[in-house]
Image: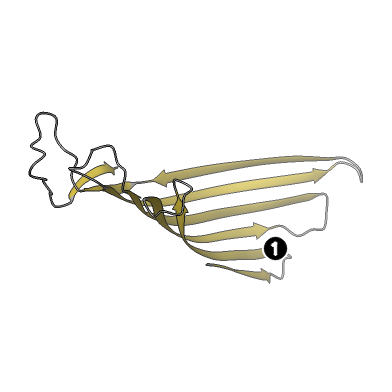
Amino acid sequence: RSIRNSLELRYVMGSGITLRSVTGFQYGDQHFINDDDGTTSREAYEDQSIVDRVYSQEFNIISPEEGPFTWVLGGSYVRQTARLDLHLYNERFPFGTIFPRQDIFIYTLTPKVSTGVFAQATYDLTDRFEIEVGARYSRDKQKQSGLLGLFPTPPLPGAIDASRPRFHPPRTVLIAQH
């Protein structure tokens, strides 16, 4: 499921300079299940959910189109947040009969922000030849945090008493935070 929207507004001033705004929003929600072993059994599969939201804004100041010299000044802002929920299920995990299955839960959250300013100028030397110059400065910031959960907890190295299976509550470990 996805949604994509945009809105463009333009205002032409008496001097011929155009003020332009472009606003955007995108939303994506994907959910799917993968069969990891290619059989009819439900012994190994992945259940994934990905949600992605993007907000964007750009402003431009645009010169009049008459004359040999034209220019554009602008700025942009983009904020994106992506979330992943992943469940890996494997009934044949290599821990033997004491731990007949292993569930792995992974959750990540990745917010990103990008900002930029730019300028472009064009000068027409003739009807068929022009000089164009432009510059852009961008700044991107990204952060990621996540959790990893294992159930049941894998056995620790050393002797294991196979007559008494040990089940532990899920153990959650923080795997990334910046």
Rendered position, 169 above or below 21: above
Q: Secondary structure at mark 1?
A: loop
| Quarter of the picture holding the C terminus | top left
The residue at 23%/45% (across/down) is 174
Asked if residue 138 lies left or right of residue 101, the reply is right
Residue closest to the eye, 165 or 150: 165
Residue with the most extreme top position: 158
Q: Measured from the top left, where is residue 77 in percent x and y?
A: 50, 55
Q: How many marks?
A: 1
The amino acid sitting under disc 1 is Ile
Residue with the most extreme front position: 163
Asked if residue 74 lies left or right of residue 128, the reply is left
Residue closest to the eye, 151 or 95: 95
Rendered position, 55 above or below 98: below
The residue singled out by tag 1 in the image is: 17
Asked if residue 73 lies left or right of residue 82, the reply is right
Q: Measured from the top left, where is residue 142 in percent x and y?
A: 40, 46
Q: Measured from the top left, where is residue 111 in percent x and y?
A: 39, 52
The residue at 55%/54% (across/down) is 75
